[in-house]
Structure formats: C-alpha cells, structure tokens
C-alpha cells in the first residue's frame, strides 16, 4: 500500500502537462515582429548604485555601447541582463529598460536598489545537522547552540567582494575570517579568496549505527579541534560559467578516547586521535537561472573533483567527485517544476570514517529522511518537484530605510517525490545502504526579503514514517 501511494504521488507529479511551456508572466514581453532590422546601442545609464561600482553592473550586460542587435531580440537581451545583474546578490530590485532614440538607435537604463551590505549581527546557530534533529533527538535543548557575533560585509569595496569574521562561543567555539574578491583584475574575469579558521566542539560524531543514526561522544570540555586554511582562484570569462581552483590544509585533533575500540579507531584511519592533510581541487559551475537563490526558470550544474592527502590509500587519503544538475521549467499560470540530480563517488572504498559521509549533510539529503545519515563510497539522489505560486504581497515598513522599504512574501504550494541509492562496503553496511530508497510529500515554500526562505514539508519515507520537516536557507 505504501509503495502504491508513492508511485501514485510520482504519477501526480510527472502527469502535469509538461508540454505547456508558457513563459513566466513576470518576464518582459517581447513584441511580435518578423523584422530583421538591427538597432545600435548608443549608451547605458545606471541609476541607484551608491556602493557598487558601475562597471560591476555593466559587466553583467551582454550588449555593449556600439553593438548592434536585431530589434526582435532587444527585450530578450534586456531580461537576460536583468537576471544576471540580480544574481550578483548585490541588489534587492533590478529593472532594465530600453529607450528608443530613433528608428536605428536605443539606450538602456538600469535601475537598481542596493541591498543592505553590512551585518554586524548576533549569531544563534544549532550544532545539529538540521532543525528536525535538534528537536526530535535533543528536545530543542538550548545547551546545543553556538552563539556569538558575526561581522559580514557583502560588498566591501564595491566590487562584489565579501569579508566575513566569526567570533562564536557556546557548545562550539570558532574564530574565522574569510575574504573573496571575484573580480580582482581589470578585465573582471579573475578573482581570489581565502578562509582561515579554528573550531572547537564539545562533541564528536564518531560512528553511524545500524539504524543510520549518529553516535556521539560528548563532554563538558572541548573534545575536537579543527584548523582549516583554504585559498582559491576563480576564472569567469563569460556570464554563466565559472572555474574555481582551490587548495588548503585541514587538521583534526580529537579526544584520545575516540581511537579506543568502544568508539571508532577508524575515525581518522591512522591509529591516532590527530592528523592533518593537504587538499587540492577544482570546481566547474554553470548557472543560468532567473534567481540564483530560488530559481523558477533555467538550469544549473556543478562538478567538483577533490584530492585529499598525498597518497591514494590509508589514512585520510581520498579522491572524490561530486556532481549536481538542476532544471527549472515554467508551465504557465504560476505553475513550475524542477528536477534535481545529485551524485558522489569516492576512492578508496575503505577509508577514514569522516570520509564516508554521503546522504544527510547540507543539500545532499532525501526529503523525509532528514533524521538519518547514510554513508557510502557512491551515492545518488533524484528529486522532482511541482509547485504553484498561490499568493504574494508586500508589507511596507513604518520607518524610512532606502534599501528595505518593505518586506515581500511569496507562498508556493508543492508536491514532490525523491529516489536515491547509497552504496557501501559490506562491513560498513547499515539498514538504508545498498537498497532503493524513495520518499514523497507535500509542502509550502515561503520566500521573503533577500530570498530568505522557509520550507515546511510533510513527507513519508521508505520506512513508513511520516512527519513534518522544516528547512531554512539564506544567501548571506
């Protein structure tokens, strides 16, 4: 009965008329014309940017002064420019207009509203993987939180460069600083960044049990210390593709008890409770969506290859490949659908415990299985979602802040189905490894200021469990 209900859900999702591909009503409508006449762009004017350098905005516009374009493609090009400018995450509003000078020339006006860039904000962070784990396993204990101060500037010099400083205490404590400058050269095609941090925790998640739950070693004192340094170089010559090269060093120092037989001698796979390793890697990104934080149209894909350690077997040595592909399709009348595919493969198959993580961390999870972790040397997930925008509105604020004149809200009702698989070696197998997994459910997405969103989902998983799950996400 449970399997039948699941496949009924899949049929309901996939059965929506996919041939209906009407464009999002929010797009600028292009006039119907068969004209092949070309028009020349005379100039581009940008209004509303006070902190952001104008050349950062002009970089995202595919047409430059002096270029010519078919008249029938002007509005398409301007809408493409609007998406690119908005996806810098520097602005809360972007509008791009043509002004026709005469029958053969036109200008472009870009009007932007800058976001609030400086955030000296208090921090209140859960140490658990998600809200559900914190509530269901630890009874929402405030002893399992990290608090402190975060200073962030998301447009430090007006070139879309970001500076972050963390000073945290509590269950975990951390001192971290990071800086990224994506456009450091004159051509705005190259960038760099670095991160340095020291983190201490009162807990080590030292093993995954047979029921796919994490076993924890907890102490009143700090039992884990991590040092991390990472530097990266970014190349972005076009508009949608990024090449990111990174390298760094990661060191772990654990409580001596972790290497005992009753805990996990294979945690670091070196017979000791400490160890460090260098790493190097490469990431390719393609992002062509209407909104990089909550897309409704377009596609994006990412691939990463990581080499950890100086050898190929033993200790912390690891070679890992990760990939993600997402396709977002508007169906018309405020209906949308999206496919998401995730995959990872690692070698060697027998490695340190902390290298075995697969499902259950960050975005690599199946809806309905948030309470579990599923380790493996190879794993894949496919997700399909159909949603409809049901209402949107704005709440004006009583005070006059130019960057935040109101708080917007949009609500999307959705239904979804996920399938997945995680492969592991036999001696590390758990009840959710090496088997076909499926889940599905219904939910609501709530989108607000600066694309902050809350997801409320009711899911059923392959164990027959049903429950309400919460997810939040911000882009800062």
Image: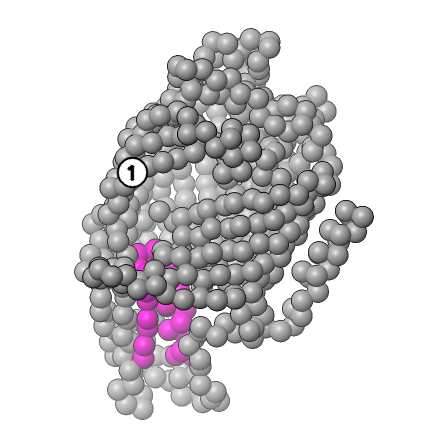
Q: In the figure, is residue 223 to the left or right of 99?
A: right
Q: Quadrant of residue 275?
A: top left
- Above or below, 398 relative to 427: below
**Considering depth in this image, is 327 or 168 the residue closer to the camera?**
168
Residue 276 shown in magenta: no
Q: In the figure, is residue 193 to the left or right of 48?
A: right
Pointer 1 residue: 122
Residue 77 shown in magenta: yes
Q: What residue is shown at x 60% (from left), y 10% (from top)?
A: 262
Q: Position of residue 469 (x, y in %)?
A: 56, 44
Q: What residue is shown at x 28% (from left), y 66% (from top)?
A: 112
- Other residues around mark 1 within 10 Å, as few (<14) / some (14–19) / many (≥20): some
- Above or below, 169 relative to 411: above
- Residue 341 seen in this snapshot: no
State the SS at label 1.
Answer: strand
- Above or below, 170 relative to 118: above
Q: What residue is shown at x 31% (from left), y 60% (from top)?
A: 91
Which region of the structure is painted magenta? 73-98
Q: In the figure, is residue 421 to the left or right of 188?
A: right
Q: Quadrant of residue 94?
A: bottom left
Q: What residue is shown at x 51% (from left), y 28% (from top)?
A: 138
């Amino acid at each position: 009965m449970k399997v039948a209900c699941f496949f009924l859900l899949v049929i309901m999702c996939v059965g929506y008329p996919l041939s209906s591909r009407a464009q999002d009503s929010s797009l600028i409508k292009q006039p119907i014309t068969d004209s092949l006449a070309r028009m020349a762009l005379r100039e581009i004017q940008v209004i509303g940017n006070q902190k952001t350098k104008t050349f950062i905005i002009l970089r995202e516009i595919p047409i430059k002064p002096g270029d010519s374009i078919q008249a029938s493609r002007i509005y398409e090009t301007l809408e493409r420019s609007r998406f690119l400018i908005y996806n810098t995450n520097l602005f809360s509003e972007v509008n791009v207009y043509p002004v026709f000078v005469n029958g053969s020339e036109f200008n472009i006006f870009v009007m932007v509203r800058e976001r609030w860039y400086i955030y000296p904000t208090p921090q209140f962070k859960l140490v658990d993987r998600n809200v559900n784990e914190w509530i269901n396993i630890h009874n929402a204990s405030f002893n399992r939180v990290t608090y402190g101060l975060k200073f962030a500037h998301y447009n430090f010099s007006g070139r879309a460069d970001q500076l972050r400083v963390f000073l945290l205490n509590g269950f975990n404590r951390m001192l971290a600083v990071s800086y990224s400058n994506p456009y450091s050269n004159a051509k705005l095609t190259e960038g760099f960044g670095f991160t340095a941090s020291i983190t201490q925790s009162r807990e080590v998640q030292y093993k995954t049990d047979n029921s796919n739950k994490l076993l924890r070693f907890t102490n009143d004192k700090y039992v884990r210390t991590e040092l991390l340094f990472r530097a990266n170089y970014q190349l972005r010559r076009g508009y949608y593709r990024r090449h990111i090269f990174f390298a760094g060093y990661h060191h772990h120092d654990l409580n001596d008890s972790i290497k005992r037989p009753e805990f996990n001698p294979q945690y670091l796979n070196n017979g000791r409770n400490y160890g460090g390793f260098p790493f190097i890697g490469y990431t390719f990104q393609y992002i062509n969506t209407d909104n990089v934080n909550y897309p409704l149209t377009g596609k994006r894909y990412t691939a990463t290859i990581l080499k950890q350690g100086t050898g190929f077997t033993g200790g912390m040595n690891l070679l890992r490949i990760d990939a993600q592909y997402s396709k977002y399709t508007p169906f018309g009348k405020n209906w949308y659908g999206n496919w998401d595919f995730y995959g990872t493969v690692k070698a060697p198959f027998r490695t340190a415990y902390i290298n075995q993580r697969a499902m259950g961390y960050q975005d690599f999870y199946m809806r309905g299985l948030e309470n579990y972790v599923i380790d493996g040397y190879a794993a894949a997930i496919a997700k399909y979602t159909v949603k409809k925008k049901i209402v949107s509105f704005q709440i004006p604020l009583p005070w006059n802040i130019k960057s935040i004149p109101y708080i917007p809200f949009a609500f999307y009702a959705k239904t979804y189905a996920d399938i997945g698989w995680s492969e592991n070696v036999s001696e590390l197998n758990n009840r959710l490894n090496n088997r076909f997994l499926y889940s599905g459910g219904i939910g609501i997405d709530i989108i607000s200021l600066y694309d902050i969103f809350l997801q409320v989902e009711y899911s059923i998983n392959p164990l027959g469990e049903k429950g309400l799950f919460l997810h939040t996400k911000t882009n800062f």
